[in-house]
């Protein structure tokens, strides 16, 4: 929900939008299961995702990643894999 601006008079307080209420109902976002797609026109990568709502429904869509965001995501995933491997190794040690 939008926080009222203390410098704004109460009569000009913005009303919550559909998007504001939608965000409150999103439970989580999962990988869509399909492979990432490259969009030649925009130079973006489209990662299929499934947005799951608190009422049990879900919607399939795509997360659009610009080239720099793809590189950042790649680095973050490599770090997550390295951390996972390190923890697995630590768990196997007596």
Image (cartoon, grey):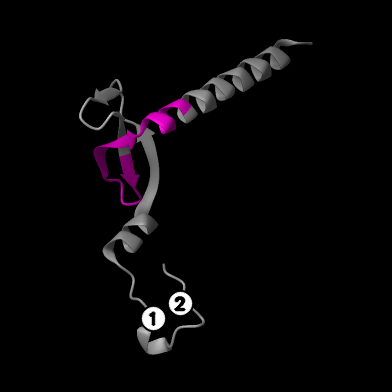
Q: CA distance from mark 1 to mark 2?
A: 6 Å
Q: Is residue 86 above or below residue 28?
A: above
> Of 48 and 25, which appears nearest the observer?
48
- According to the image, label 1 marks what residue? 13
| Residue located 36% across and 84% down the image | 12
- The C terminus, quarter of image: top right
- The N terminus, quarter of image: bottom left
| Residue located 54% across and 20% down the image | 78
Left or right, 28 with reference to 57 = right
Q: Are marks 1 and 2 in contact (CB under 8 Å)?
A: yes
Mark seen at residue 59 = none
**Crowd band around label 1 with a 10 angstrom C-alpha radius: few (<14), some (14–19), many (20+):** few
Q: Is residue 16 above or below residue 6?
A: above
Residue 58 location (% of width, % of height) = 27, 42
The magenta stretch is 51-71
- According to the image, label 2 marks what residue? 4
């Amino acid at each position: 929900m939008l926080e009222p601006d203390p410098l704004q008079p109460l009569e000009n307080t913005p009303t919550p939008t559909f998007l504001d209420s939608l965000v409150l109902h999103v439970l989580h976002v999962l990988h869509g299961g399909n492979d990432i797609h490259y969009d030649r026109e925009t130079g973006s990568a489209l990662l299929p995702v499934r947005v799951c709502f608190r009422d049990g429904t879900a919607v399939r869509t795509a997360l659009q990643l610009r080239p720099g965001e793809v590189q950042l995501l790649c680095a973050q995933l490599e770090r997550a894999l390295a951390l996972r491997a390190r923890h697995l190794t630590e768990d196997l040690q007596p």
